[in-house]
Amino acid sequence: MLLTIEQVKKQFAETEVLRDISLHVEEGEFVALLGPSGSGKSTLFNLIGGIIEPDEGTISLNNKIIHGERGLIGYMPQQPSLFPWRTVLENVVLVQELSGKPNIQEAKEWLKKVGLEEFENAYPIELSGGMKQRVAFIRAMLSKQNLLCLDEPFSALDEFTRINMQKWLLSVWEANRKSILFVTHSIEEALFLADRIYILTKRPTMVKEEIIVPFKRPRDESLFNNEEFFHMKQEIFNLLKDELDEGL
């Protein structure tokens, strides 16, 4: 097991955010976290990344407890977070610079793979939203960590660009098979991308249900018209709706 989270609790002052969270990610697996707004998904990422520590429970990577340890995962935030004064290539190798000598040739090869080779000397202001997200993803990939945590990376994109980015992400993931833990608010996105989905409750957050996604890979947008896809989407919607209704 690559990542194991067991009965993790986290509280800030009087606010209980996470309660007895248990989940796991296997080698080469794509796992989605799906839950209401404010359900502590970003807090969970901060715990995995070592920015904060759990009050109770354990977080293990490769069977080693990693509380408070940083630099062990690749991370892609909701916004691309590119430095405007650095070129695309300079942004891509930033994480490598912080940990040692950057591999410029490898970075250029990745830019070529994702169709950005002509933009290596461009600045972020010259890029579209989808292009910025690709740069941020390559930066996470070049961190060389086995686990990538992606925090709603496509939520700010328009629908057409988002679908294209989802297909692009799947193609890159199929070729490299790094383990991914993916936060999203979109049921369709979770079903389209993931092997498994954890449905989270409202705060204090617990795992309400684990869903195994049955659709074969590789996947394309024709899946959105699949009858089983529609029924699973409705099932998950009802699970999330129950959470929202209970909070009213």
Image (cartoon, rainbow, N blue to C red):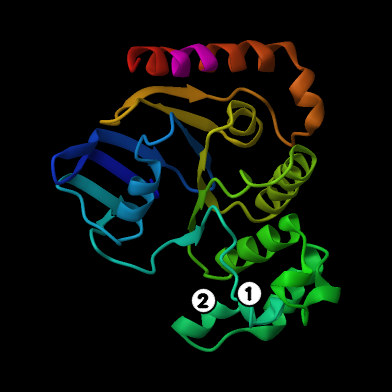
Disc 2 designates what residue? 95
Count of picture labels: 2
Determine which quarter of the picture holds residue 221. top right
- Please provide percent x and percent y for residue 7: 21, 36
Return the residue found at the far right: 118
Magenta range: 237-241
Q: Residues within 10 Å of mark 2 (few under 14, many from 20)?
A: many
SS label for mark 1: helix
Q: Residues within 10 Å of mark 1 (few under 14, many from 20)?
A: many
Residue 165 higher or lower than 187, as above or below: below
Disc 1 designates what residue? 92
* Residue 62 visible in image: no
Q: Amino acid at mark 2?
A: Val
Q: Amino acid at mark 1?
A: Val
Is residue 246 found inside the magenta-colored segment of the image? Answer: no
Return the residue found at the far front: 248
- Please provide percent x and percent y for residue 50: 30, 61
Determine which quarter of the picture holds residue 239. top left
Badge number at residue 202: none
Return the residue found at the far bottom: 101
- Please provide percent x and percent y for residue 51: 30, 62
